[in-house]
Amino acid sequence: MALQKLPLVGLLLLLTTVVSPARADGPVCPPTTKLSRASFPEGFLFGTATAAYQVEGAVNETCRGPALWDIYCKRYPARCNNDNGDVAVDFFHRYKEDIQLMKSLNTDAFRLSIAWTRIFPHGTKEKGVSRAGVQFYHDVIDELLRNGIIPFVTVFHWDTPQDLEDEYGGFLSERIVKDFREYADFVFQEYGGKVKNWITFNEPWVFAHAGYDVGRKAPGRCSSYVNPQCQDGRSGYEAYLVTHNLLNAHAEAYEAFRQCEKCKGGKVGLAHSPAWFEPHDLADSQDGASIKRAMDFILGWHLEPTMYGDYPQTMKDIVGQRLPTFTTAQKAKLRNSADFVGINYYTSTFSNHIEKPDPSKPRWKQDSLIDWENKNAQDYTIGSKPFTAALPVYSRGFRSLLKYIKDKYGNPEIMIMENGYGEELGATDSIAVGTADHNRKYYLQRHLLAMQEAICIDKVNVTGYFVWSLLDNFEWQDGYKNRFGLYYVDFKNNLTRYEKESGKFYKDFLSQGVRPSAIKKDEL
Ligand SMILES: *[C@@H]1O[C@H](CO)[C@@H](O)[C@H](O)[C@H]1NC(C)=O
Ligand SMILES: *[C@@H]1O[C@H](CO)[C@@H](O)[C@H](O)[C@H]1NC(C)=O
Ligand SMILES: *[C@@H]1O[C@H](CO)[C@@H](O)[C@H](O)[C@H]1NC(C)=O
């Protein structure tokens, strides 16, 4: 290896004295003939992911306070498929059994989120801390570590305490910044000695866009010209405001993390959720050019402030006065406030340049001057879409996205915080049909290969990969009808878990090659 590297090192020294050769060289991939764990660089982590509201249930235990989604699903049952997270898949009581499932898959890591409402049931420390709630996450984390599984913890996965919603509108108010910092600081101090990988916010784009621009997710706000179900809200304004407060909250949390003694050696980032885009009409140069703009709006919006301290210029130019501005002090706190780029990737779409935006009906998508199209100008769908698939399957978009991030943002460390396949089985839903999930297996295979190519051919620095999800769970507006698990959950019979074909595939994939369990905790 060292010998092979020498000519390249020499060349790089000629070209530049700034870039370190080891980094520019890219990840080292072992030669393999078949796709398995062994096809990835040493130390690469594989895991599964979940989120508190989607799996825990036990909403009345540990003095847990009401969360945004508890109230939303009760107020608007149809907007949660008449389901709710009261019981979910009862991870709260079954986490020990579920950790055995993770172990049997040979996974190295597990991504969970902390429910804010279990720590500060009413949103602030002053209103009380639930010691039982704090203890629950200690128990889960300790059980993971005992089983050799590295915890990755999300601080906020959409479950705003309802008390803060009622008091000041949650993320619509800048008051959230101080309260979020207090909460993040509390969990860092509490768990930072044993948890070294943190995600402050999950999918800020979805949280802001679905929650405050199209009203598809809690709190379900938007203008009625966007979605007649919305009873309140203002599209084209609130999503920008919510993002602004969220980013300032992130920067404050990052500062608290850096000041936390026992957190030393840890990493903090966000989990972004960009789609990838292909031009709607290859013959239309405006569609080609729109891809860059689409990426600025869906990814740069939240990523660039944490790198450079400000929004992408494209957004400032188009959104104008509706886009809030950061103060000099806020910019300074935001700059370099993420240690890695977390990415959740699911699907891609076609980008069609908008000819005539309607300024009287502002909304995020229109601001990007793009229509999202399921079919291109030649009437082809992107990738493939099996009958029961929730979203089109396009693994090439995954590789393109990773290469795009590497090239555009200076080769940052990237972790795939979620990737997975949702399936709506409808009337055919049964244990037999649900566990025979070859489409999910195929999806994972294709995306693992696309990621391997991104790492080994395009030299993108990806260091970890989490499948969404370990188990079927509460899928927000789709309730329990959209299944994402490697394990099937029988919602009709005591929430029994059954391994799916995809689970068996992931297990086999991970059994070949060396588990990076030899890596010491303080090296992570
Ligand atoms: C990838 O990122 C990690 C973390 O920043 C760094 O330690 C490593 O050297 C990088 N690898 C490459 C090949 O650039
Ligand atoms: C939780 O408590 C509330 C208020 O007492 C009650 O209405 C609700 O049914 C309880 N939910 C569960 C799942 O026990
Ligand atoms: C339901 O499942 C739980 C967890 O595996 C188990 O402890 C319990 O005995 C089961 N209950 C019934 C009625 O089978």
Image (cartoon, rainbow, N blue to C red):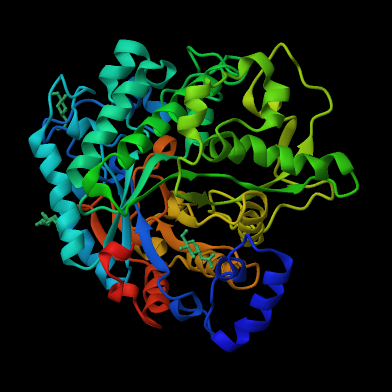
Question: Where is residue 87 drawn, in percent x and y?
Answer: 22, 40
Q: Give the residue displayed 34% in from the left and 27% down from the top.
A: 73
Going by the image, does 202 lie left or right of 517?
A: right
Viewer-proximal residue among 194 and 494 = 194
Question: Where is residue 76 drawn, in percent x and y?
Answer: 38, 22
Q: State which quadrant residue 218 falls in.
A: top left
Question: Where is residue 100 drawn, in percent x and y?
Answer: 21, 66
Q: State which quadrant residue 450 falls in.
A: bottom right
The mark tally for this picture is 0
Going by the image, does 189 lie left or right of 106?
A: left
- 466 lies above or below 377: below
Q: Give the residue displayed 66% in from the left and 29% down from the top.
A: 365
- 52 lies above or below 514: above
Q: Quadrant of the N terminus?
A: bottom right
Q: Quadrant of the C terminus?
A: bottom left
Q: State which quadrant residue 188 falls in.
A: top left
Q: Is residue 1 visible?
A: no
Going by the image, does 360 lie left or right of 29?
A: right
Q: Is residue 133 visible?
A: yes
- 271 lies above or below 505: above
Q: Give the residue displayed 25% in from the left and 69% down from the top.
A: 103
Going by the image, does 113 lie left or right of 510?
A: left
Question: Where is residue 137 drawn, in percent x and y?
Answer: 18, 46
Q: Residue furthest right?
A: 283
